[in-house]
Image (cartoon, rainbow, N blue to C red):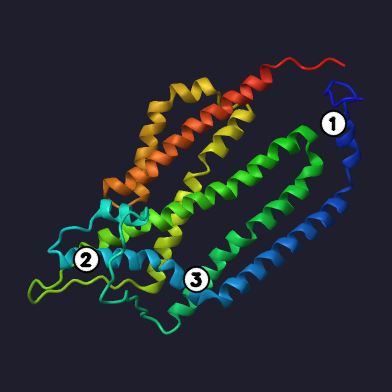
Amino acid sequence: MNDIVTSDGSPDDHEIESSRAPLMDHLIELRSRLIWMVLAFAAAFILCFAFAEPIYIFLTHPYEMANRMFEASRANGGHGAGPFDLIEVILGLKDVPQAKNSVALITTAPLEFLFTKMKMAGFGAVILSFPIIAFQVYRFVAPGLYKRERMAFLPFLIAAPVLFILGALLVYFIILPMVLWFSLSQQILGAGAVTVQLMPKVSEYLSLVTTLMLAFGLCFQLPIVLTLLGLTGIVSAKMLGQGRRYAILAIVVVAAIVTPPDPISQLMLAIPIVLLYEISIICVRIIEWRRKEPSPVS
């Protein structure tokens, strides 16, 4: 017996029939899955909160790098440290200048840093526990899917966190240093009686980091969304190809909204998303090609 899908009595249909369970069994299964999700999130939250200070120091590394480049620029009379120099430093083509002063972040409320660490622990817990949460969701819905649907769902389950991490890494190593360097360059220092110095709050800095990581991580989910739409027949490769110019325009607009007002960081987001859009077209075309393959005859 092969796995041919027929209109009557296919192996997949028998598999669905055998997996049906009463409502109470489904509710018990749902409760079990939810308990595992909560336990995974709680364990990840406790772990992240226990290492909250080292994690926060790790997140301030882009600020430290931008501060070093800014101080090097001031020491050279405003020359020799700009966006392209940051890229060279990131790529290892140039050494990071040593800063005379350490970066300073402030708190304006007695428990502000405590709540900041809790928010950071929550954000980190979502990231760390996502594989377990996604697996529990998959185990709950898998009995209601055909075998071919389960096999098609697994690649997306793996690709989603990978693409999110790639977007977050782009933010950490490239976008954040540029954003912070641009912010530092707006200061007014040594210009007379008026001084405008950047002293970000710990909570606002964390909000900037998490907002950019979420924005880039979600934007990097574009291939998954478009491929799923292609899998369900909502979009086609021809439709995506014909709408390429409008998609590029929308990508540029989104990049301009979620990034600082400088062309370098906007291109850093727009170019990868355009490439991911082209990859999405290829994925949808492969899906359509596989659908046109003749079905094997028993």
Q: Position of residue 144 (x, y in %)?
A: 80, 40
Of mark 2 and mark 1, the one earlier in the sequence is 1
- The residue closer to the viewer here, 87 or 49, is 87
Mark 3 sits on what residue?
55
- Amino acid carrying label 2: it is Ala
Left or right, 281 with respect to 243, comes to: right
- Amino acid carrying label 1: it is Asp
Quadrant of the rendering where the C terminus is positioned: top right
Left or right, 63 with respect to 294, comes to: left
Of mark 3 and mark 2, the one earlier in the sequence is 3
Left or right, 173 with respect to 231, comes to: left
- The residue closer to the viewer here, 122 or 97, is 97
Quarter of the rendering containing residue 17: top right
Label 3: element kind: helix
Q: How many badges with numbers are in the image?
A: 3
Of mark 1 and mark 3, the one earlier in the sequence is 1
Quarter of the rendering containing residue 67: bottom left
Q: Which mark is residue 12?
A: 1
Quadrant of the rendering where the N terminus is positioned: top right
Query: What residue sits 56% from the left and 26% below the top?
Result: 235
Query: What residue sits 67% from the left and 16% below the top?
Result: 292
In the image, residue 152 above or below residue 110: above
**Disc 3 + disc 2, Cβ < 8 Å:** no
Quarter of the rendering containing residue 30: bottom right
